[in-house]
Image (cartoon, rainbow, N blue to C red):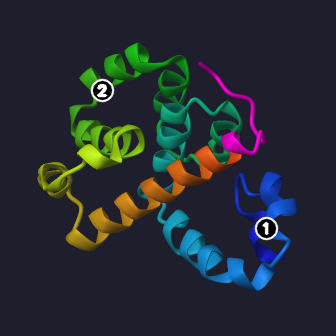
Amino acid sequence: AGWQSLPGLGELAPLLACDPPLFTPLETLIRQLSTDDSFGPQVALLAARTNGSPTCFDAWLPHWQGEEEFASHLREGDQALHHWLQQHPQSRSLVTAVQLLTRSPDRFSAAQLTPLAEYGLSAEQAIDLLTWSGLCGWMNRLKIALGNVRQQT
């Protein structure tokens, strides 16, 4: 199936192969959202790191085409990421929104949308980013729950 080529989904093959037609809408959504080079891999890396999933992080790392320092600081943890954000304040709104949506989706509110607009995202891009962030976080947690990843605490 085509979804097996998507980063990080190979581990879920036995589960998803039970009823491939049911997966088609999810595959379409993943393909549409993950191909946005402006934030697709970055959001996936942030969600994986926030969830403590090095396996998911490693699956997306080859797709990251941005600044290498971002990925290395992200891998090192919150303090290193905070240091990177001090040098790249324009990225703070994106990182904060993804982390909050991943950690505490119930606390996410419209207050996080304004900084995304200031970051330069259109309303459609902001919604796509948040949808992709939620989907990445959900897939990370699903793989963790199924024992298909190594976890970092």
Residue where numbered disc 2 is placed: 85
Q: Main secondary structure of the magenta part?
A: loop
Q: Is residue 12 above or below residue 76?
A: below
| The magenta segment | 144-153
Tell me the residue at 24%/44% (across/down): 107
* Residue 91: percent from left, percent from top: 28, 39
SS at circle 2: helix
Ranked by sequence position, the earlier of labels 1 and 2 is 1
Q: Is residue 14 above or below residue 55?
A: below
Screen quadrant of the N terminus: bottom right
Amino acid type, residue under disc 1 in the picture? Leu
Query: What label does residue 67 carry, if any?
Result: none
Tell me the residue at 79%/79% (across/down): 20
* Residue 14: percent from left, percent from top: 87, 61
Q: Is residue 72 toward the left or the right of residue 131 in the image?
A: right
SS at circle 1: helix
What is the crowding at mark 1: few (fewer than 14 residues within 10 Å), some, or many (at least 20)?
Answer: some
Residue farthest to the bottom, as pictured:
21
Residue where numbered disc 1 is placed: 16
Amino acid type, residue under disc 2 in the picture? Leu
Q: Nearer the viewer, residue 121 or 143?
A: 143
Q: Magenta includes 34?
A: no
